[in-house]
Amino acid sequence: MHIMGSNRNEDAVLALLDVAARIERRLDHHLSATRGVSFSEYRLLKALSEARPHGAMRVAVAEAVALTPSAVTRALRPLEKIGLVTTERHERDARRSMAALTPAGAELLGDAERIVADVLDTLPVKGLPVETLAGLQRELGAPRTARRHP
Amino acid sequence: MHIMGSNRNEDAVLALLDVAARIERRLDHHLSATRGVSFSEYRLLKALSEARPHGAMRVAVAEAVALTPSAVTRALRPLEKIGLVTTERHERDARRSMAALTPAGAELLGDAERIVADVLDTLPVKGLPVETLAGLQRELGAPRTARRHP
DNA sequence: GAGCAATACTTGACTAATCACGTATTATTG
DNA sequence: CAATAATACGTGATTAGTCAAGTATTGCTC
């Protein structure tokens, strides 16, 4: 099945995971140093901004950012407390907890996006194949964006 | 500096991080279900196997797998306990703790590598640019492998 | 429309990682 | 060669995530 000890796929994917971990760490440090949010929180805010104006369910956000719903519940709590996010229950379905970005959240997200862009500009990422990555995202079950309010 | 709301680099990198998280999770599940090791542990074993036969310092392993030395210390402990790894101090430098793969560790690593390869074969990763990724690894401070015994 | 199944969320218990700090050892420098 | 700096490791405290299980609520089926 596999020729011992040499698999291009494997090498490439392991390199990808390694690179991802390192970039994520770098972004995380910059973001928390300058704006006090983690990279994970950045991704949450971004997912919510794509679900405007009606907000998104926990499960949708979870899928969008590749976390469990449980993690989303926990991660959103502090963001609500500092006024970046609001949550209210869906009017027709009492199970759903719709989270939405506040103006303050949107503003912070704007800053954060600038920081992220600046950090990424210092990286030699020219040759990344957006097509392949997007295909992978699709294949791995990532929806294009957090669903609006299905 | 940046045209509002559209940055190819950013899109590509965010997709990369997303894809990486999902792949890692998938590998982690398969590995722990079948061989009882996490993906993180898999990476540790792999790093050690590349540092044979003399083993590697905690700091070198940490750099190789993109973790902190502290995390490596903690992660190696259970692996020692179940006999996959041995640690002994360096003869000429009492600060150094040299970790090495045992035969059992090497065997398990072999199994794990097969599992990883199988999982990756189910993924459409043909188009990944090994060159670009390797360049990124270099740029981000990843050494080619855990140093032998410098 | 009563009852069962599915969905959305939350909580409890746990794990793996981080940072900040401390200690032991070796290297450097005056 | 004494004093200082740098290196390697480990530990305490904290955090962010996981899974498993529980509680509401809604949808489905007969």
Image: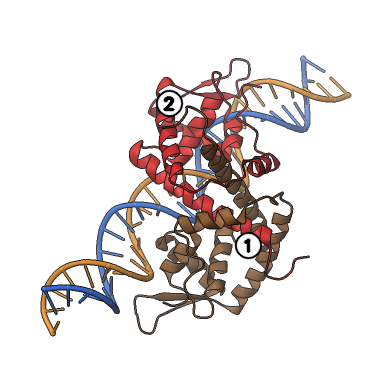
Chain colours: A red, B brown, C blue, D orange
- Give the image location of residue C20, x and y in percent: 29, 53
Element assignment for label 1:
loop
Residue B36 tag number:
1
The crowd level at tag 2 (other Cα within 10 Å; few <14, some 14-19, many 20+) is many
Please report the residue visible at 63 percent of the width from the left and 60 percent of the height from the top. A11
At horizontal 44% and vertical 78% (from top left) the residue drawn is: B149
Q: Quadrant of the C terminus of chain A?
A: top right
The residue closer to the viewer here, D10 or D23, is D10
Secondary structure of the residue carrying numbered label 2:
helix
Q: Which residue is at a point 45% across and 37% down the rendered structure image?
A: A117
Chain letter of disc 1? B
Residue placed at 56% from the left, 73% from the top?
Answer: B49
| Res B67 seen here | yes
Residue D28 relative to residue A38: left or right:
right
Q: Residue A94 carries which label?
A: none
The Cα–Cα distance between marks 1 and 2, rounded to whole angstroms, is 41 Å
- Give the image location of residue A84, x and y in percent: 42, 26
Percent of width and height locating residue A142:
65, 38
Type of the residue with mark 1: Gly
Relative to A11, is B90 above or below? below
Task: Tell me which chain the residue with mark 2 is part of.
Answer: A
Residue B70 % position (x, y): 40, 62
Q: Is residue A64 above or below residue B72?
A: above
Quadrant (top left/top right/bottom left/bottom right) for the N terminus of chain A: bottom right
Tell me the number on the disc at residue A105: 2
- Of B8 and D5, which appears nearest the observer? B8
Q: Is residue C6 left or right of residue B60?
A: right
Same-subunit check for callouts 1 and 2: no
Q: What residue type is labelled 2?
A: Gly
